[in-house]
Amino acid sequence: ATLLRLRERQEDERAKAFARERATQAALVNDRAHIDARQRALLQAIATMAADRPQPRKLYAAYQYERFLGRTRDARDSAIAKQQEHVDAAREELESAIGERRIMEKLIERTEAARDYAARRREQRLHDEISVMRYARASRLRVDDENSVDSDSGHRGVRRGPDRTGDS
C-alpha cells in the first residue's frame, strides 16, 4: 500500500508538472494572439495614416514597430514549438506514471486475491478436517455400540431382537 501511495504521489506531481507546461504554452499562445492583434491594428493605422496625410517619420516608426512585432511573433512561434516539446515530454511522463500506478494497483489486487484464495483454502481444509473428525467420531460411537455387551443375551457384539433368545 505504501508503494501504491508513492506511485500515486508521483502521478500527482507529474500531473501538476504537465498542467504547468500546458499553462505556460497557453500563455505563449495567448501572448502571440495579442501580438497578432497589435500588428493588425498597427497595419490598419499605417494604412489610415498613409491615406490621409503621409508623415514620413511617423510612417517609418510605425513600420519599424511593425517589423519588431513580426520578429516578436516569430520568437513566440519558436517558443511555442519548444514548449510543445516540453508539453509532450510531460505528457509522456504522466502517462508513464499512470501506467506504473495501474500496474501497482493490479499487483495489489492480485496479491489480495491470492491471499483471499489461500484463506478460503485454509478454511475449506479446516471444514474438511472437522467433517472427517465428526465422521470418525460417529463411526467410533457406532462401533462402540456394536461392541458393547448386550445385557439380555450375554453375547458380545451380537444383537438379538426381542423375538430371539440368546439360546443356541
Image (spheres, rainbow, N blue to C red):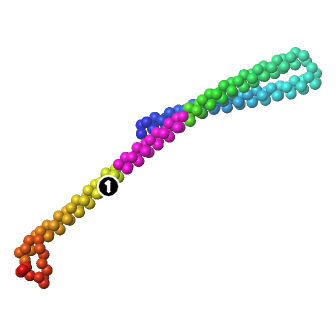
Residue 45 rendering spot, x and y as whole percentages: 86, 26
> Which residue, as the protein is rendered here, is positioned at the far bottom?
163
Name the secondary structure under disc 1. Answer: helix
Q: Position of residue 76 (x, y in %)?
A: 71, 24
Examine the structure image and report whether residue 114 is included in the region drawn in magenta: yes
Asked if residue 57 is positioned above or below residue 85 in the image, the reply reads: above
Q: Is residue 130 in view?
A: yes
Q: Residue at x 72, y 22 (%)?
A: 75
Image position of 139 with respect to 88: above or below: below
Residue positioned 30% across, 54% down in the render: 125
Check disc 1 and report the residue beneath it: 124
Residue at the location (44% across, 45% down)?
Answer: 109
Residue 5 in magenta?
no
Left or right: where 64 falls relative to 13: right
Residue 50: percent from the left, percent from the top? 91, 22
Three-letter amino acid code at disc 1?
A: Gln
- The magenta span reads 96-118
32 or 100, nearer to the observer: 100
Going by the image, does 92 lie left or right of 165?
right
Residue drawn 67% across the image and 32% down it: 26
